[in-house]
Amino acid sequence: MANVTSRLNPAIWPATARTDSKSGELSLGGISATELMERFGTPVFILDETDFRARAVKFRSAVEKIFGPTAKVYYASKAFTSIATAKWLAEDGVNLDVCTGGELAVALAAKFPTNRIELHGNNKSIAEIEEAIKVGVRFIVADSLIELDRINSIAGLLGKKQSVLLRLTPGISAHTHESIATAHEDVKFGFSIASGAAMLAAVTALNAEHINLEGVHCHIGSQIFDETGHILAVERLVKFIADVKKNQGAALHHLDFGGGFGIAYVDSDDPMDIESVLTRIHAALTELCAKYEIEIPSIAIEPGRAIAGPAMVTLYQVGTVKDVLLEDGKTRTYISVDGGLSDNIRPALYGAEYSALVANRSSNAPTTDSRVVGKHCESGDIVIRQIALPSDIVPGDILAIPATGAYGRSMASNYNHILRPPVVVVRDGSARIIIRREKISDLLALEEG
Ligand code: LLP
C-alpha cells in the first residue's frame, strides 16, 4: 500500500500494522482491512506472522543471552495454538508448553520435536499422561501426589523413566485479576512450599523408581506488569532447591518460573521491557544461588500472551449503531459488531480493556462516547465498555481491535450457536487461512438426536 504511516501505538498493534495517510485505511502484513474483509469475511482474527515470530525469537535470544545457552522458552499453547504457529516455533528454536491432550495433539500434528514439549495441568487424565510419556515429552510438570503416583506407574508400565518438574506454590499474590493469579496459597495449583507439601512431593518423586525429578516450576499469574512477584517466586524456589539438597542430598538443576509477562491493550498500559526484566531476575537468581550455596539451575520461562497477544487483530463489521439516552441526560452510542463474547470473553470475564480503530477509512468527525458490543443475547456482551470513537461510524464500517491474539480464539465458544471465526496469517502482502471459519454443518455434525 502506498502512503503508509505509523500513527498506531507499536506497543498495541502488530509490527506490520499501518494506516494509509490518504485513505486512513488500516493494513496488516501489507494487505488492507477491506481486502481482508472481502476475502475472509468478519469477524476474523488476523495474525501477523512477522510479529509473532519476532516476539518468540526475542524471548529466546533474551533468555539465552541473559541466562546462558541452556535456558529455554516454552511458549504457552493455551494463549493460542495451531499447527502453523507450532511449526514456526519449532523452526525458531522455541519450545512448547501444552496442558491438555488437545494441545499436545496440535503439537504432534505439527511434528513438533517431542523432547521440546512439556505437559502441564492440575488434573491430567491418565490417557494424557500416558500419551505424553509414550511420545517422549521433555517434562511432565506434576501437580499432586496422586499425579506423581500415576506418572510413576504409567512410566513403569511403559518401561520408561519420566523427567518431572514439581509445580510449586510459592505463596505470592501477583498484582493482577483474581482469576488469573495462581500462586497464592488458596489455589488449586501445585504444592505449597510453606505447608510442607512441596517437600513431601520432592521426597515422593525422588523415591519413585520411574521418575527423574529434575527441578521445580511455578507460574505466579498472568498479565503482570512488574518483576517483583517473579523475583520473590525465584527466591522461594531457590531456597526450596537448597532445602532439598540439604535434607535429601539431591540436586535439582532446573528452575522454570512460568509466564505472565503483561502486554499493552490500551495506551495507558506500560508493559515491561523483557530484557531488562530478565536481567533483574538473573541478578537476583545469581545472588540467591550464592547465598543458598547451590549451583545456578538451568532456566525456563513460559510466555504465552506476550508472544501471541499483540500479534493478532480482530476485524469486525459494524452492523447497527444506536444512541442510548443515559440517566444523567448524556447519550452513549452503542456500536454492534458481528462477533462479541464468543470470540472475546475477556472483557466479560476479567473486565479486560481493549482499543479500537475504524479500519476501512479515516474520519474527521468529532468523537463520541461509545460502547462496542457484540451480537449475543446478554447485555454483558461488551467488547469495549467505554471508548471515544468517531461519531460518523455507520453499518458496514470495519472495526479493528488490536492485541486479541492471546486468549481470544483459544477461549472462543459457540454461545448462541455462533460460528467461531477463522485465523488468517498475513505476511509480505499475502494472506492464508490457518484455521478456517466454522460452518453450520460443523455445529450440526455434533447432533445425534
Ligand atoms: N505457564 C503456565 C503454567 C500457565 O498456567 C500460563 C497461563 C502460562 C504459562 C502463560 O501465561 P501468560 O504468559 O500468557 O500470561 N485466560 C486468561 C489468562 C489465563 C492464563 C492461564 N495460565 C486471560 O485471558 O487473561
Image (cartoon, grey):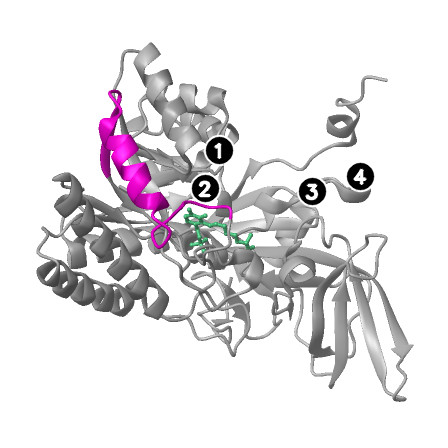
Q: Please name the amino acid that badge 1 sits on.
A: Glu
The kind of secondary structure element at disc 1 is helix
Q: Residues within 10 Å of mark 4 (few under 14, many from 20)?
A: few
Q: Are marks 1 and 2 in contact (CB under 8 Å)?
A: yes
Q: Is mark 4 within 8 Å of ligand 1?
A: no
Q: Separation of disc 1 and disc 2 at Cα? A: 7 Å
Q: Which is more N-terminal, label 4 or label 1?
A: 1
Give the residues in magenta. Answer: 188-214
Q: Separation of disc 3 and disc 1 at Cα? A: 17 Å
Q: How many marks?
A: 4
Q: Please name the amino acid that badge 2 sits on.
A: Ser
Q: Separation of disc 4 and disc 3 at Cα? A: 9 Å
Q: Position of residue 88 (x, y in %)?
A: 37, 40
Q: Please name the amino acid that badge 4 sits on.
A: His
Residue visible at 44% across and 69% down in the picture: 11
| As drawn, 398 above or below 81 | below
Q: Please name the amino acid that badge 3 sits on.
A: Ser
Residue visible at 44% across and 70% down in the picture: 10
The kind of secondary structure element at disc 4 is helix
Q: Which residue is mark 4?
A: 417
Q: Which residue is mark 2?
A: 77
Q: Position of residue 69 (x, y in %)?
A: 14, 47
Q: Separation of disc 2 and disc 3 at Cα? A: 17 Å
127 is within the stretch colored magenta: no
Can you say which quadrant of the picture contains the C terminus?
Answer: top right
Q: Which residue is mark 1?
A: 103
| As drawn, 197 above or below 370 | above
| As drawn, 57 above or below 248 | below
Front-most of 291 and 124?
A: 291
Q: Which residue is mark 3?
A: 413
